[in-house]
Amino acid sequence: MSGFRISLVIFCVVLAALDGFDVLVMAFVAPTLSASWGLNGSMLGALFSAGMIGTAIGAFFLAPLGDRIGRRPIALGCLMLLAVSMLMSAATRNFSEMFAARLFTGIGVGAMLATINIVITEYANDRRRSLCNAGMSVGVPLGATLGGLVSVLLINHYGWQAPFVFGGVAAIVLLPFAWWLFPESLDFLIEKRPTRALDRVNRILPRLGLQELSALPAARDPNITDGRLKDLLSASLKGPFVASCIMYFCIMMTFYFVSSWTPKILTDAGLSVTGGISGAMLLSFGGMLGCMSFGLLAAKVGAHRLTAITMVALFAMMLLFSNMGYHPTLLVVVAVTLGFFLYSAVTTLYVVVPVAFPATLRGSGTGIAMGVGRLGAVFGPYLAGVLIDMGWSREQYFLVLALPVLLAAILLRALRSPQMRGDAESVTS
């Protein structure tokens, strides 16, 4: 891992932190915004889901474009979209305008997360790939944790609009750094061979500590066409691809239910708005510990085995959280532990999914799987709002939204098929 690779991973962590703040900021402003606009549970759930609908669109349609036009323009475009949409959110005056603004924010987040996940997969060396992708996933809870701290101060002094302004300004500040640091994918340049591909490759190689090339190496996947979905549904990739999509759906459904509704659930239980946000921050803090722990242990324990342990533990912690009383000390311990496994479950997907696909399908395969996951992210928070309005108890709707985690653990076996292992080895060699 050269200095440039490490710098790139760190910058991707910062971008992921911005994404984490942007997509979860609605959870921080929800209590204040709900009181100000008189929103019911279903309307608030719809606003939570608006960002998830956008992330599905971004992952489905923008991230796969990275296989055609390159990863760099997708990342820069998404960062500009985040800046504009967050400032739009601060200027909204009603439910419909906020829904639209959150939709555009989600589009930028969905494509950005898929793109930086792929770039880290391509630029990290084999030994540190799991750790680097786990490090990237730390960015999301890091952004949520710092965002929670900032949001408490901003909301108390300036109102619910202030956190959105903060997110928009942060994206604007990061744009020049992204232009300078974020590289094009070497795999894209070699496989797609755009204009002046060799010159562009030779500008990147010295930054990696490698010698320049006199000619581009032969493409590794010359038979793959532009019919991305058809290639992903080929005999060799169909099983792992479908399993990846369902796993993403299940994990994201549960993840965004917990992360979106925790502040509102805690305030409804009697805590202050600040206390509710603090509960969400505890989840995020535990998540940062969980992500890095997974990255450090994956190579020793085995990524798939550790993934199964993480998912079963998450199911158990959700049941405990839904049945616990709100004693301050107990809340700290349980919330941190729940966050530890909640965010780790997402990290497992960042580690095991990208290497399942060859370079020319990595953006499409990862993006579509993430897009399917975003559909789960849309469904989870909205279903919770509906069940709450129907009078379901906390224990009941937590159980319903925890069961998908067990299904994901069962489907993990499909990712360990012989064909899947062979594909992963060919990509990482």
Image: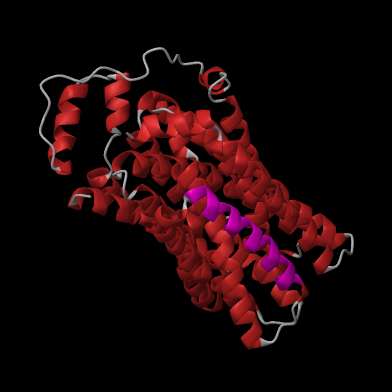
Q: Does the magenta stretch include residue 116?
A: no
Q: Taking 65 as reference, is 132 above or below it?
A: below
* Residue at image location 82% in from the left, 55% down from the top: 386
Per the picture, the main secondary structure of the magenta-coloured stretch is helix
* Residue at image location 61% in from the left, 41% down from the top: 413
Quadrant in the picture for residue 249: top right
* Residue 110 spot, x, y in % from top left: 52, 43
> Is 209 placed left or right of 155 in the picture?
left
Q: Give the range drawn in magenta.
A: 303-322
Q: Taking 255 as reference, is 78 above or below it?
A: above
Depth check: give the residue in front, 43 or 378: 378
Quadrant in the picture for residue 202: top left
Residue 88 seen in the current view? no
* Residue 396 spot, x, y in % from top left: 84, 63
Residue 129 seen in the current view? yes
* Residue 420 spot, x, y in % from top left: 51, 32
* Residue 88 spot, x, y in % from top left: 52, 51
> Is 78 placed left or right of 210 in the picture?
right
Depth check: give the residue in front, 426 or 279: 426
Colour scheme of this structure image? Answer: secondary structure
Q: Taking 184 as reference, is 291 above or below it?
A: below
Q: Taking 275 as reference, is 110 above or below it?
A: above
Q: Quadrant of the C terminus?
A: top left
Q: Is residue 321 magenta?
A: yes
Depth check: give the residue in front, 48 or 91: 48
* Residue at image location 58% in from the left, 59% down from the top: 310
Count of number-bearing discs: 0
* Residue at image location 57% in from the left, 63% down from the top: 341
- The residue sitting at the right extreme is 391
